[in-house]
Amino acid sequence: MSVLDRLEATIDARKAEGDTSKSHTAQLLAKGRLKCAQKFGEEAVEAIIAASTGDKADLISESADTLFHLLVMLSASDVSLKDVLKELERREGISGVAEKAARTK
């Protein structure tokens, strides 16, 4: 089991428990999907800023925050990490140009 799998399991447990007095994750999830998406966006922007400044330590820290908040947003949307990984596997070996051209959206 990878660290992302374990993190997802912890997020799912906090979601099921729903104890907002003891869990930041439960607090985020209680605020709903939109708030979770906004928080993910904030963290992604912070990672972008860290990358643009060249601060590796900050980029590592902000990337970890971004991954955490991505998993929280996925949980709030009832999407699993497994679902996302399956999509990445589906795209594996397909050029980005071909993959984008095949999209119907």
Image (cartoon, rainbow, N blue to C red):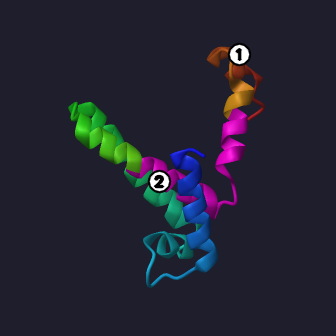
Instruction: Give the labeled residue for mark 1.
Output: 98
Q: Label 2's element?
A: helix
Examine the structure image and report whether residue 79 is included in the region drawn in magenta: yes
Examine the structure image and report whether residue 86 is included in the region drawn in magenta: yes
What secondary structure prevails in the magenta region? helix
Mark 1, residues whose alpha carbon is within 10 Å: few (<14), some, or many (≥20)? few
Instruction: Give the labeled residue for mark 2.
Output: 68
The answer to which of 41 and 80 lies nearer the viewer is 80
Q: Quadrant of residue 13?
A: bottom right
Q: Is residue 6 left or right of residue 39?
A: right
Q: Residue at x 60, y 46 (%)?
A: 1
Q: Label 1's element?
A: helix
Camera-side mark, 2 or 1: 2
Q: Is residue 92 left or right of residue 72?
A: right
Where is residue 12? Give x, y as percent: 62, 65
Q: Give the residue type that dot 2 points to.
A: Phe
Where does the magenta region start and end?
65-87
Mark 2, residues whose alpha carbon is within 10 Å: few (<14), some, or many (≥20)? some
Confirm whether residue 61 shows in the render.
yes
Confirm whether residue 49 shows in the render.
no
